[in-house]
Amino acid sequence: MHIIAKPLAAVCLHFLDPILSLHMEELGWSEDDTGFVFALYALTWAIGSLMAGCICQHVNRRVVIFLSFITLSMSLLLVGPSAILGLPLSNQIVLPGFILLGFSVAGCYVPLIPEIVDAVAEIEN
């Protein structure tokens, strides 16, 4: 699960860095105001990390990662937005997509941390 979840979440993060400002300018945002979207994404990632940690105490980590995959794909359809679904390019669709993307990426990363720590501890012992 780690081999799939980590690269998928990383791709979602790294595709945003070079194109997010350009994408938001298409929506009518100024270059200075696009930092708001980066802040919104970071805030939802931080809150989502806390939520994912709490959820993982009660639900199997693989289930959390799988549900995060589903929300990740939904968020990418909104961020795009998907021409296949006929979604228009507007702030009302793109911004909720970024909010959902922050929660989704957190749900992919946080459940993997205990496995990474266990693997490192096993190697050191």
Image: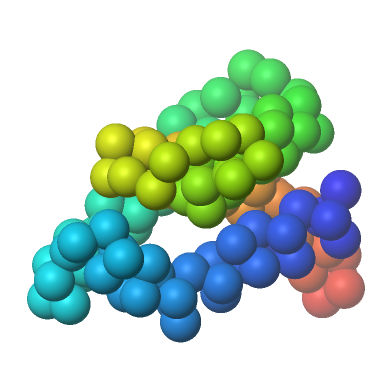
Depth check, front residue: 98 or 50: 98
**Residue 30 relative to residue 102: left or right:** left
The colour scheme used to paint the residues is rainbow
Q: Is residue 88 visible from the viewing direction of this image?
A: yes
Q: Is residue 33 above or below residue 83?
A: below
Depth check, front residue: 124 or 2: 2
Q: Where on the picture, by quarter, is residue 77?
A: top right
Q: Is residue 46 visible from the viewing direction of this image?
A: no
- Residue that extends furthest to the bottom in the rendered view of this protein: 18
Residue 86 lies, in percent from the top left, at: 56, 35
Which residue is at 31% across, 66% downward? Answer: 26
Residue 35 lies, in percent from the top left, at: 20, 69
Q: Where on the picture, by quarter, is residue 65?
A: top right
- Residue that extends furthest to the top in the rendered view of this protein: 58
Question: Number of callouts in the render?
Answer: 0
Quarter in which the C terminus is drawn: bottom right
Depth check, front residue: 105 or 37: 37
Residue 13 lies, in percent from the top left, at: 54, 66
Q: Is residue 42 above or below residue 18?
A: above
Q: Is residue 52 above or below residue 44?
A: above
Which residue is at 84% across, 56% downward? Answer: 4
Residue 119 lies, in percent from the top left, at: 83, 63
Which residue is at 82% across, 75% downward? Answer: 124
